[in-house]
């Protein structure tokens, strides 16, 4: 397996891969949690509205585009959203996720999301 030749990805393919990872792993949980919190506090505009899913998807994509555009120029400001490892062309998609996942900050983010979502789900179910 170590002898498998790696094909060099095009810069466009690598950029799209990095953008998709940023939107999926960094931006989406933030906006999904925000929509869930709005539902928890009783915002009735969100009940049964498919626009919520569209909002979360578009907001995640816009947030990721902004992070990818300005992250390299302002790394201190975008340090929690922009991940340079997502844009390393020599890494495969699975390797990019693995490298990100093994960092202490990412691990803390994942644990927070895993613990926060069930709590919010229980509260939402009990409130109505």
Image: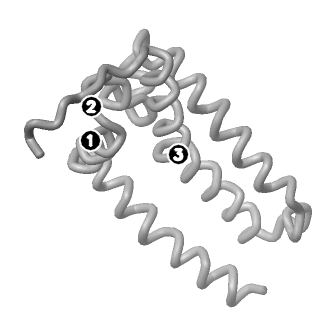
Q: Which mark is residue 95?
A: 1
Taking depth in this image into account, of 64 and 77 the one nearest to the observer is: 64
Q: Secondary structure at mark 1?
A: helix
Query: Residue 20's spot in the image, x, y percent?
Result: 52, 36
- Decide: is 11 above or below 48: above
Taking depth in this image into account, of 89 and 79 the one nearest to the observer is: 89
The answer to which quarter of the image holds residue 60 is: top right
Name the residue rendered at 26%, 47% in the picture. Answer: 98
How is the structure coloured here?
A: one colour
The mark nearer the N terminus, 2 or 3, is 3
Q: Secondary structure at mark 3?
A: helix
Taking depth in this image into account, of 128 and 97 the one nearest to the observer is: 97
Q: Which residue is mark 3?
A: 24
- Residue farthest to the top? 73
Query: Residue 51's spot in the image, x, y percent?
Result: 86, 53
**Residues tagged 1 and 2 counted as in contact (Cβ below 8 A):** yes
- Mark toward the viewer: 1 or 3: 1
């Amino acid at each position: 397996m170590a002898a498998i030749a790696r094909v060099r990805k095009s810069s466009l393919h690598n950029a799209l891969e990095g953008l998709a990872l940023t939107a999926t792993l960094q931006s989406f949980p933030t906006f999904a949690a925000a929509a869930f919190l709005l539902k928890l506090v009783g915002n009735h505009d969100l009940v049964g509205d498919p626009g919520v899913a569209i909002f979360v998807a578009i907001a995640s994509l816009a947030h990721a585009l902004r992070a990818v555009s300005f992250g390299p120029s302002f790394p201190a400001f975008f340090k929690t959203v922009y991940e340079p490892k997502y844009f390393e062309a020599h890494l495969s998609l699975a390797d990019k996720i693995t490298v990100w996942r093994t960092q202490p900050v990412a691990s803390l983010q994942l644990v927070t999301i895993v613990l926060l979502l069930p709590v919010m789900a229980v509260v939402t179910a009990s409130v109505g």
